[in-house]
Amino acid sequence: QVQLVESGGGLVQAGGSLRLSCTASGSAFSLYVMGWFRQAPGKEREYVTSISRSGASTDYADSVKGRFTISRDNAKNTVYLQMNSLKPEDTAVYYCAAADTTVLWRRRSQYDYWGQGTQVTVSS
């Protein structure tokens, strides 16, 4: 079992930055691929990014590539999402997720554990 807790959300103006954190407790954090997803009001939850167990490999949705950066610190059981050049369309609840796999999955169904989410609001 893995428990995930996100933090760092908030209100920011367009063009600004935020850094989200997701801290895990329970089973060995370094054994999980970690991902970030987001869900805007009235829309399905969508993939944002993922990172391999060692942190050596990452993957990004086209909508955030070049603006967002995922990283992890296995010693701190934490994964981060640095979000720069934020746009109003980035407004959503952001969720971190853990997958017991070696593949950087984009499908929600491949992730085994989820956090409760943190709200990010970008004003224009």
Image (cartoon, rainbow, N blue to C red):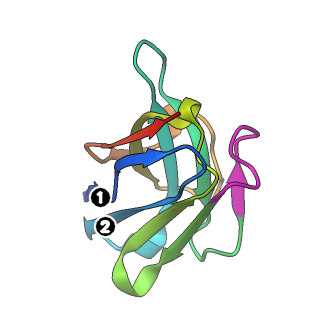
Residue 58 percent location from the top left of the image: 69, 62
Residue 31 percent location from the top left of the image: 47, 70
The foreground one among 17 and 42 is 17
Question: Which residue appears at 46% of the width and 36% of the height?
Answer: 123
Query: Which quadrant is home to the N terminus?
Result: bottom left
Determine whether the residue tagged by mark 1 lies in a helix, strand or loop: strand
Q: Main secondary structure of the magenta part?
A: loop
Q: Label 1 to label 2, Cα distance in Å?
A: 8 Å
| Residue 64 picture quarter | top right
The foreground one among 2 and 39 is 39
Q: Are marks 1 and 2 in contact (CB under 8 Å)?
A: yes
Residue 10 percent location from the top left of the image: 33, 49
* Residue wearing tag 2: 23
Question: Which residue appears at 40% of the width and 18% of the height?
Answer: 41
Disc with the residue nearer the chain's start (1 vs 2) = 1
- In the picture, the disc for residue 49 is none
Residue 35 percent location from the top left of the image: 52, 52
Q: Is residue 65 magenta?
A: yes
Q: Is residue 111 magenta?
A: no
* Residue 85 visible in the snapshot: yes
Give the magenta range.
Answer: 58-68
* Residue wearing tag 1: 7
Residue type, label 1: Ser
The foreground one among 21 and 14 is 14
